[in-house]
Amino acid sequence: MHIQKEFFKYVLPSMLAFALSGVYSIADGFFVGNALGDQALAAINIAYPLTAVILSAGTGIGLGGAVQYAICLGTGNTQKKDQYFGLSSLLLAITGILLTFLILMTAPYVLVLFGASGEILALAEEYIRFIAYGAVFQVMGTGMVPFIRNMGGAMASMYAMVAGFMTNIILDYLLVWKLPYGMAGAAAASFIGQGVTFWVCLIYLLQKKQKLLLPMRSECFLMLKRILTVGISPFGLAFSPNLTLILINKSAVVSGGNFAVTCYATVSYISCVVMLLLQGISDGAQPLISLSYGKGDEKTAKQFRNLSYLFSAAVSAICILLLLLCRSRIAGLFGASEAVTAEVSKILPLFTVGFLLVSFTRSTTAYFYATEKNAAAYLLIYGESLCLLILLLILPVLLGIWGTWISVPASQLCVLLLSIVLLRWPLTARTASISR
């Protein structure tokens, strides 16, 4: 009973926080779609993977450092955990600055590669340019949340996300619906919301009097390597839905044109929220798994993992039921046309099949990187995108646009089977020493 109480103490706030981050991703689409129509909705859908690079970088670095922080907490190494926090904070700030310049320079070319053209390309460029201006706030905001959660502030991390979410919604309403700022207004609302999340996190850290230490030069490289080695997994986990988005958008353009891209925009927004709910469960369990692992208590770590499996399956089943009941009306919430709404109603049930599959693989992946079994985590995260790419080269040729849609749950099934194999026959017991 104590284990279950601890599990839900961490997981429920994490779920809400991740659900709100999912609403971040659809809020701009909701306001812009209703204000500017189908092409604006498609433009944000195509541009969103670049936004996701920023958010995923913050998540990867933040969780990479937070895992090491929790493990050091488990071993009782107080100084080292503070050094991991300081080094991760510096890395987050530098990454945010670099991403601003990188996205501003490359976005016009990348958006064309993603399938944007004409008015959709112009709208997407306007949106992503303003997103890039606020990259530092977005990286710092997403990167601080996992640290606060691993410091025992699960509720504080939730409050930070709620504050950012409310700011985003209010500014979207003002800048897109009431004032004529369109795509630029939606982008500004997003990064200002993330900035508010960061400032709430900063207030919590100041109240906790969290030390901001940096390691000695001789230790810096090793600690940086550990942060990034673990961080590659949560980065990939956060960004993998957007790899799916990129690949499906490209395939949809070829197989079904801009109409198919607009249909998938609604499906991807909905799927994003469900996937982030499931990620909230797995990442909420991560501090408990890492802390148990740091103490050398693998049995308890597996108990937390198994609770994550059960709860994720239950949440995904509820989401599937709700979406099937509401599928004929969902696209209309985004201002989609009647033709798009009707098509989404047809294809949405196919995508919901994958939610149960993902509920298992997300929890498995989080367990692997929380216990430094990084090679297994890499295989699951990046293996899904590879499977999807292979399937998209084959199925649309045979089945047209339905081949594009079927490729998503098929790739998720492949990864589920791979995760079962890796749990049964792990690549290695541990990929790094617990000694800190």
Image (cartoon, rainbow, N blue to C red):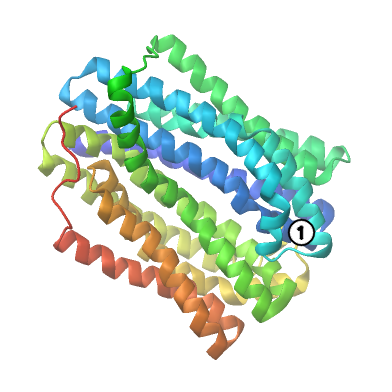
Residue 266 placement (x, y as % from top left): 64, 62
Q: Does the image show residue 375? A: yes
Indicate the amino acid at tag 1.
Answer: Gly
Camera-nearest residue between 246 and 325:
246
Against 320, residue 21 (above or below) is above
Q: Residue at x 75, y 46 (%)?
A: 127
Q: Residue furthest bottom?
A: 398
Residue 135 placement (x, y as % from top left): 62, 35
* Direction from residue 187 to residue 303 in the image, left or right: left
Q: Residue at x 37, y 22 (%)?
A: 85
Q: Residue at x 60, y 57 (%)?
A: 269
Residue receiving disc 1:
335
Camera-nearest residue between 29 and 330:
29
Residue 58 placement (x, y as % from top left): 49, 36
- Picture quadrant of residue 354: bottom left
Quarter holding the N terminus? top left
Q: Residue at x 41, y 27 (%)?
A: 88
Q: Residue furthest right?
A: 180
* Direction from residue 26 to residue 185 in the image, left or right: right
